[in-house]
């Protein structure tokens, strides 16, 4: 019985991880017939001296710090507030109005590949928060670039929509949240 348990554990462990090495186990039936005083200890599982695989080698390092305060990304009147259908706020403004980073972070997306957002910029602020700036006219940043809070990242436009506006979202753990309570009271 003991033989089956040990073999089962060895098989189970062998399938679980690639960073463990195993000493070969001889035929256990001969081992179990020896008196206890003559039995040598069974080989033990030992860690290999090779580094663990880095599954986040292509991940973008972002400091895991809280965002102290968010600033308004642009001046203008709020056209549409956060709702079930509108996952952010829409801010009206003139064509070419500067759009600023609401908080410091790293640009993780800059392009027009997401339908319904036009020219879109996404900033990762930490492991919890992202902000999105949609319908921009002229992006002034590139993917991978670090930006400071208040840094000009784009200009207001109407890409992907029929009016000049900025669609602004804040996402917490991937879920859209109402940005209005987080934004400071003035631009």
Image: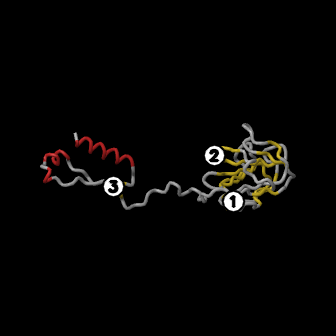
Q: Is residue 160 left or right of residue 174?
A: right
Q: Which of marks 3 and 1 is nearer the N terminus?
A: 3
Label 1, residues with CA under 10 Å away: few <14, some 14-19, many ≥20: some
Q: Which mark is residue 174?
A: 2
Do tag 3 and tag 1 residues touch (Cβ < 8 Å)?
A: no
- Measure the alpha-carbon separation of dots 3 and 1: 44 Å
- Measure the alpha-carbon separation of dots 2 and 3: 39 Å
Q: Is mark 3 on a helix, strand or loop?
A: strand
Q: In this view, does 30 lie to the left or right of 129?
A: left
Q: In which quarter of the image is residue 142?
A: bottom right
Q: In this view, does 162 lie to the left or right of 83?
A: right
Q: Residue 136: horizontal and vertical position, in percent?
A: 78, 52
Q: Which mark is residue 57?
A: none
Q: Residue 26: horizontal and vertical position, in percent?
A: 21, 50
Q: What element carries label 2?
A: loop
- Residue at x 72%, y 55% (from the top left corner): 70
**Residue that carries the numbered disc 3 in the rendered image:** 21
**Residue that carries the numbered disc 1 in the rendered image:** 104
């Amino acid at each position: 019985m003991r033989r089956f348990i040990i073999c089962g554990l060895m098989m189970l462990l062998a399938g679980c991880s690639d960073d463990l090495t195993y000493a070969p186990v001889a035929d256990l039936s001969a081992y179990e017939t020896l008196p206890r005083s003559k039995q040598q200890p069974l080989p033990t599982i030992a860690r290999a001296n090779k580094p663990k695989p880095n599954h986040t080698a292509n991940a973008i390092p972002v400091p895991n710090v809280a965002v102290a305060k968010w600033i308004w990304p642009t001046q203008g009147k709020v056209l549409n507030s956060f709702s079930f259908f509108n996952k952010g706020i829409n801010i009206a403004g003139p064509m070419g109005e500067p759009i600023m980073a609401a908080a410091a972070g790293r640009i993780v997306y800059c392009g027009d590949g997401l339908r319904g957002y036009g020219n879109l910029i996404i900033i990762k602020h930490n492991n919890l928060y992202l902000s999105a700036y949609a319908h921009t006219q002229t992006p002034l940043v590139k993917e991978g670039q670090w930006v400071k809070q208040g840094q000009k990242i784009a200009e207001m436009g109407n890409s992907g929509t029929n009016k000049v506006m900025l669609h602004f979202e804040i996402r917490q753990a991937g879920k859209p949240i109402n940005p209005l309570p987080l934004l400071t009271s003035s631009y």
